[in-house]
Image (cartoon, helix red, strand yellow):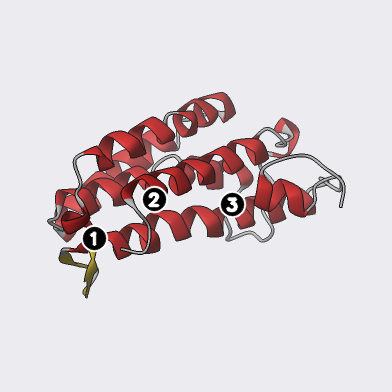
Amino acid sequence: MVLTKEELIGTLQNEVRILLHLISKVDESKLEYRPTAKQRSTLELLQYLTIVGPIHLSAIVSGKFDMDAWSNTWRTNQAAAKQRDLQQVKDEIGRLPALFADLLASCTDDDLRTKMEMFGSTASRGLWIVRLVLCHYSAYRMQLFLYLKASGGEELNTLNLWAGMDGRM
């Protein structure tokens, strides 16, 4: 693995830190903003972000992927996520750093190098974590940033997106 386990955990936790910074910029009056009719609203995007990492990481850490079980877990968690308001979303996302550390605590470097199949492809568990957790948070954080900008967040800039801080460019 290119990253150590500690670096992987720290990188995932940093994604959450930046995400929480962006969430602090959400105008509650614009939670229903959606770029087009078929895209998620800002609130729906945030609700999704409460479940995507935990579901994928739990499946990867288990080392066994069962599509039916994963689908059932997804449906159950998605139904719960759809009930969350902005504060509940913040609270759930705020719990992710500890959850990531807990889920990865028992993984060894050998565990992270072990191959497993998910969604019809085979890769190391470490690569699955990068693909399905780290990359998802980076991508959806960008989407959230663009939603915030498009719905009036003119003060937001690159530092908000990539460093998780206010500042001038």
The residues bearing labels 2 and 3 have C-alpha atoms spaced at a distance of: 18 Å
Q: Quadrant of residue 64?
A: bottom left
Q: Is residue 16 left or right of residue 99?
A: right
Instruction: Name the residue carrying label 3.
Output: 141
Nearer mark to the viewer, of 2 and 3: 2
Secondary structure beneath dot 3 equals: helix
Asked whether the residues under the numbered discs 1 and 3 touch, taking CB atoms below 8 Å apart as contact, a structural biologist would say: no
Look at the image and tell me whether residue 52 can be seen. Answer: no
Q: Amino acid at mark 2?
A: Leu
Estimate the x, y position of residue 18 in percent, counting from the top left.
60, 42
Q: Quadrant of residue 158?
A: bottom right
Q: Is residue 83 left or right of residue 151?
A: left
2 or 3: tag closer to the N-terminus: 2
Tell me the tag on residue 80. Answer: none
Instruction: Name the residue carrying label 1.
Output: 125
Q: Is residue 37 left or right of residue 117?
A: right
1 or 3: tag closer to the N-terminus: 1
Q: Is residue 158 above or below residue 54?
A: below
Q: Amino acid at mark 3?
A: Arg
The residues bearing labels 1 and 3 have C-alpha atoms spaced at a distance of: 23 Å
Estimate the x, y position of residue 13 in percent, counting from the top left.
47, 41
Secondary structure beneath dot 2 equals: helix
Nearer mark to the viewer, of 1 and 3: 1
Nearer mark to the viewer, of 1 and 2: 2
